[in-house]
Amino acid sequence: MAPHLGQDEFFKSLGELLSKTSQQVQGSVYLTQKPLIDVPGATTTNSQPSILIRATDGNTNTPNLKKEGKDKVAKKSQKIKLSTIVQPDEIEAFYVRYAEVCKAGMTGLKKRDRRGRKAKTKGGAAKVTKA
Amino acid sequence: MPYLPTSQAYLEQSRAVITSVPRHSKHSSTSHLNTRIVTKYNFPTNRRGNLKQAYKSQVRKDAAKPTDAPSNTPAPPSAATATLTLKTFNPTTGICLHYRTNKAQEVGRLITSLGKLAAGADVAGLGLSAAVPAAGADVEMTDAPAPAPAPAEEAAPVAGKAQGQGQSAKGKKKGGKGKR
């Protein structure tokens, strides 16, 4: 497995992965978080473990037996795996950036349609008052 | 593996899973720490079944319209909205919680909440309702908002009372004088 990335590197790669997925309008991104326990390289302060963050696209490197014939022609893309370790005292700062990166990258979600709703209510209200 | 109706319910339940320690577990001290949270951001797939369904619904829509423009292609991919699925799973207890949304405005809040869940069991308030005032509730979140509204609320009734008392006292005094 690839070594854990630094936070800056992780965020950069994650941003690329998310925006790529959003642009293609296809595919998935999996973000996993779990506590690291009894693992060398993780520090534990007052019973709070480090957090391991992983990000992958859903691809698998194992060959699909059904599609084997086709895959020989078109080479499959490698699975993207990113991971980083967050120390307990860095969690807050990390998640602030994490949320920003996710917000910026997940553009495929439905945006809030504020303008339409406001216009509707305004129009309705105006009509009511006029009448 | 239920899909919870609101993000708040999901976060509260997840916190319960993360903080609770099962009674009859050998590794009771660490078992709750195995809980992992997976956030999946995905677009609808291009599987044949999915495409067929999209095509059928498109046909139905076209048929419903008065100006029938037959389109042989399935719904354009640009129309697809992504989905964000959150999953909390504890392998020891087998508890698995889901929450699914497609709203962009929820992303920031959800991720920050996940951070608070990750920060550990002693986070009493997720910015959610009814944070249990436990002994270990020395979180900034609970302290910060409380002092601000309290003085204003206190000040107003006190002032009102003071005025009311003053008036009533005067009235009583006068009344008393007149009677006597």
Image: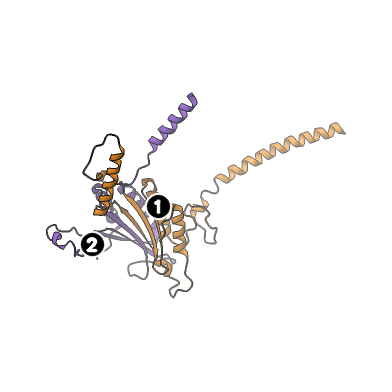
- How much space separates mark 1 and mark 2, taking CA atoms? 27 Å
Q: Mark 1 falls on what kind of element?
A: helix
Chain A tint as drawn: purple
Please tell me whether mark 2 sits on a helix, a strand or a loop: loop
Q: In what quadrant of the picture does the N terminus of chain A appear?
A: bottom left
Q: Chain of mark 2?
A: A
User: How many badges with numbers are in the image?
Assistant: 2
Q: Is residue A44 visible?
A: no
Q: Position of residue A2 (x, y in %)?
A: 24, 64
- Near mark 1 (Cα within 10 A), the count class, few <14, some 14-19 or many ≥20, is some
Q: Nearer the viewer, residue A10 or B77?
A: B77
Mark 1 or 2: in front is 2
Residue A17 appears at what percent x and percent y?
26, 53
**Chain colored orange:** B
Res B110 label: 1
Q: Nearer the viewer, residue B95 or B110?
A: B95
Residue B145 in sight? yes
The residue positioned 45% from the left and 71% from the top of the image is B29
What residue does disc 2 label?
A60
Are circles 1 and 2 on residues that touch, CB within 8 Å?
no
